[in-house]
Every structure is written in structure tokens, then in C-alpha cells.
Amino acid sequence: MATRHHAAGSTHPMLTDTRLTITDHEFRQLRDFIHAHTGIALSEHKRALVCSRLAKRLRHYGLPRYADYYQLLTQDDADGQELVAMINAITTNKTDFFREPHHFRFLSEEVFPAYRRNPNRERPLRLWSAGSSTGEEAYSLAMTVLETMPSFNDQDVHIVATDIDTDVLARAEAGVYTAEQAKRIPAELLRRYFLKGRGEFAGEVKVKPLLKALVHFEHLNLLDDPWNFYGLFDVILCRNVIIYFDKPTQLKLFQRMGATLKKDGYLMLGHSEAMHGLNDLFKPVGHSIYQLRGKT
Ligand SMILES: C[S@@+](CC[C@H](N)C(=O)[O-])C[C@H]1O[C@@H](n2cnc3c(N)ncnc32)[C@H](O)[C@@H]1O
């Protein structure tokens, strides 16, 4: 039987250079397991990707076959630690500061000015970055808020940023980025909202406390039901996340996000994602931007 204990923490020398291959049966088992726990739907053409992303977990335990790893996940993971590691290995975390800039333009030109003008606005302004990865999206939101409404502080705006992947959340929380990651941040904003690393941290930048104070990172699997949020949101960004889910899961998430938005709230999706069949719930108001209809 595959046990986690005998080889955990070490790399098995015999397996380091071995090319692991996955059988049809092993792929189907792992694919179904991943789908059940994350919503991520992996088609046959993602087989090589699954294989390579999980290979490091097999090597970590010195396991020769994916069947052994499946057994470990399903029968020898009582505390769920390997499930967390498997999810962290399987997720795709690509992100960027101000990715899909038209969303941030829409927020600073339409949504935030309307919020500020509204005499009945509910305080605080609440924004959710769902599937926030390493935090660039959430910090871009925070910069957009402060650039549009410079007097806002952590009493006026709450940005909740969630992800299923505990590794990316830890990096988001640290708020440290390489020069390469920071190159999409306009120079003026970089100066205003980031500290420059010195000495051994030269080349890196770190989010300043005034920006950090607006963002709260939390672990959340979007499949969890219910989501225990304190209050509704003005805007939800769920970008480049549902593309990995199947249609029924997407539909259910859109409905739940509708129920999680304030009246006239907005949902923003990634550039290649669209909402189909929920015209009575949301109306399109821009490229991959939807507004909640008729909630009172
Ligand atoms: C490609 S990144 C997108 C990051 C950011 N939203 C953007 O557009 O730049 C997708 C993120 O969704 C997260 N994710 C995948 N399945 C999830 C789930 N079931 N619940 C929560 N987050 C999930 C992944 O861990 C990953 O960090």
C-alpha cells in the first residue's frame, strides 16, 4: 500500500530521472477526483499537463505509479494535507497587474464615480477578487480605488480576495513581486504604492501598508456552499477562473454570485469567458462585464 509516511519529505533517488507515464484508467480516476474537489474539468488533451504537474507529488513520496498516488489521496490522507498539495500543484495561476485593463477603466470611469455620487451608498464599498491567485488583481483593484477616491481608507472599502490554492495566497499576503511581475504597474503607481527592495531584495517591490490595509486574503474553494461572507458585494471579479469549469458548474456559480451582489452590482469575467442563458439575472454592460438586474 502507498503510505505517505515512509518517504514524505524526501525525493526517491530511483525515481528522480524516471519518466512517469499515466494509464487511461489512472488519468480518469485522477481527473474525476480533481473535478469533484475543485470544479476544474480536465479534458483528454490536458493529460500531459496533469501528468507533469502531479509527477512532482509522486516523486516527493517515491511512488512509481499514478495509481499509488490516487490510493494515497483517497485512502491515506485523513488530515487532507495531500489534497491541499495536490490542488496547489494542479491549479493554473497565471495573472498580472491590471490584466484586462478595460475592467479597471470601467471601475474608475463608471462604477466608482457613480458610487461616490450616490447619496444612499452603503459603506463600505465591497469588492471581491474571486480566484485572486498571487494577488495582482486585488492590489490592482486597491490602486484603482485609491486613484479614484484618494480619501478612502480601510473603513470605506473592503477588498476580499480568495483562492483555493494556499501557496498563491501566501505569496499574495506577502505582497512581494519581482521586477518582471511589477513591470505592468505604471511608474507613478509603483512609486506611490510599493516599496523598493534593497540589498538582497534589490529588484523586488513590496506592497505598501496603505494598499495592503484594503485587501483581505482568504482561502475559499468556490465549490463550497455556502460562502460565509459578511455582507454583499458591489463588484465581483471572477476572471480566468470559470474557464476551467464545466457549464453546469459555471451556471451555478453565476447564480450564486448574483445572490452575493448588492442591487445593481457588477460581475466581471475574463476576456474569453461569457455568461449564457442568465439574461433575466444579469445584463451585459461592457466587454465581459455584467450588471445584476432588478434586485430590490
Ligand atoms: C488563472 S488564475 C486567474 C487569476 C486572476 N483572477 C486573473 O485573472 O489574473 C485562476 C485562479 O483560480 C483559482 N481556482 C481554481 N479553481 C478554484 C476553485 N474551485 N475555487 C477557488 N479558486 C479556484 C486558481 O487557484 C488560480 O489561482
Image (cartoon, grey):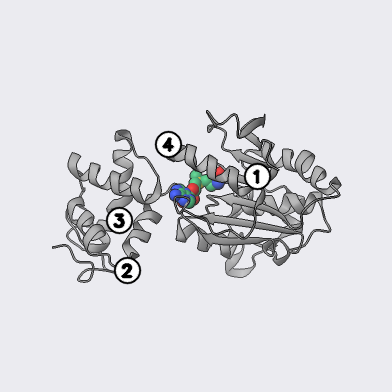
Indicate whether 295 appears above or below 199: above
Viewport quadrant of the C terminus: top right
Label 3: which secondary element: helix
Determine which quarter of the picture holds residue 196: bottom right
Amino acid marked by disc 1: Phe
Taking the image as shown, residue 134 lies to the left or right of residue 4, namely: right
Kindly tell me whether residue 286 is visible in this rendering: no
Taking the image as shown, residue 207 lies to the left or right of residue 274, namely: right
Can you identify the residue that label 3 sits on?
56
Residue beneath the point at 82% across and 55% down: 150
- As measured in the structure, the alpha-carbon distance from the residue carrying label 2 to the one carrying label 1 is 38 Å
Can you identify the residue that label 4 sits on?
248
Tell me the number on the disc at residue 34: none
The answer to whether the beta carbon of the residue marked 2 is less than 8 Å from any atom of ligand 1 is no
Label 2: which secondary element: loop
Q: Position of residue 241 (x, y in %)?
A: 50, 43
Amino acid marked by disc 3: Lys
- As measured in the structure, the alpha-carbon distance from the residue carrying label 2 to the one carrying label 4 is 30 Å
Residue beneath the point at 54% across and 45% down: 256
- As measured in the structure, the alpha-carbon distance from the residue carrying label 4 to the one carrying label 1 is 29 Å
Indicate whether 253 appears above or below 60: above
Q: Earlier in the sequence, mark 2 or mark 1?
A: 2
Can you identify the residue that label 2 sits on?
79
Can you identify the residue that label 1 sits on?
98
